[in-house]
Image: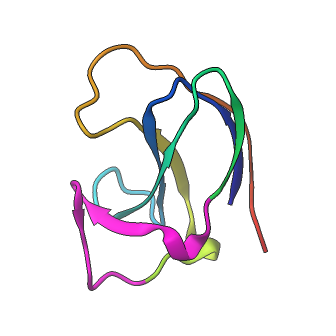
Amino acid sequence: MLLQVRGDGKDYQLRVRTDDRFDGISYRYRFKTQAGTTQIIKALFADFEPTFRGRIIKEALPLSAEKIQQIGFLIADKQAGRFSIEIDWIKGLK
């Protein structure tokens, strides 16, 4: 997946789910933004980690691009205060 973002220097996660449930396993890709700078992030599917409530699920199946149903972003790791991230676009990779 490629995404173009403009961030605030904080760490974010790109999260995808392979079902339409609110809770359950999600796959995360962590990335750091540079304040005030537009970046292109290359998130390879093999680099996504399967997680449930912050814990890595070792027995989960690898992420399958064909099964992605939800895409979201998360600021985590107890970063307090204001945040700002602009998502210009998201593209799939073959």
Q: Residue at x 50, y 48 (%)?
A: 31
Image colouring = rainbow
Q: Give the side of residue 87 with respect to residue 71, left or right.
A: right
Residue 69, how many percent across, how many down? 55, 60
Residue 92, how many percent across, how many down? 74, 61
Image-quadrant location for residue 89: top right
- Quadrant of the image containing the N terminus: bottom right
Q: Residue at x 44, y 31 (%)?
A: 10
> As displayed, is residue 78 above or below residue 26?
above
Magenta segment: does it hold 47? yes
Q: Give the side of residue 64 with respect to residue 5, left or right.
A: left
Q: Give the side of residue 61 with respect to residue 52, left or right.
A: right
Image-quadrant location for residue 74: top left
Write down the region rendered in magenta: 43-61
> As displayed, is residue 93 above or below residue 84?
below
Q: Residue at x 38, y 14 (%)?
A: 82
> As displayed, is residue 65 above or below residue 2?
below
Residue 13, how many percent across, how many down? 44, 47
Q: Give the side of residue 66 with respect to residue 15, left or right.
A: right
Residue 26, how many percent across, how many down? 38, 61
Q: Residue at x 36, y 69 (%)?
A: 50
Residue at the limit of the structure toward the top, as seen here: 82
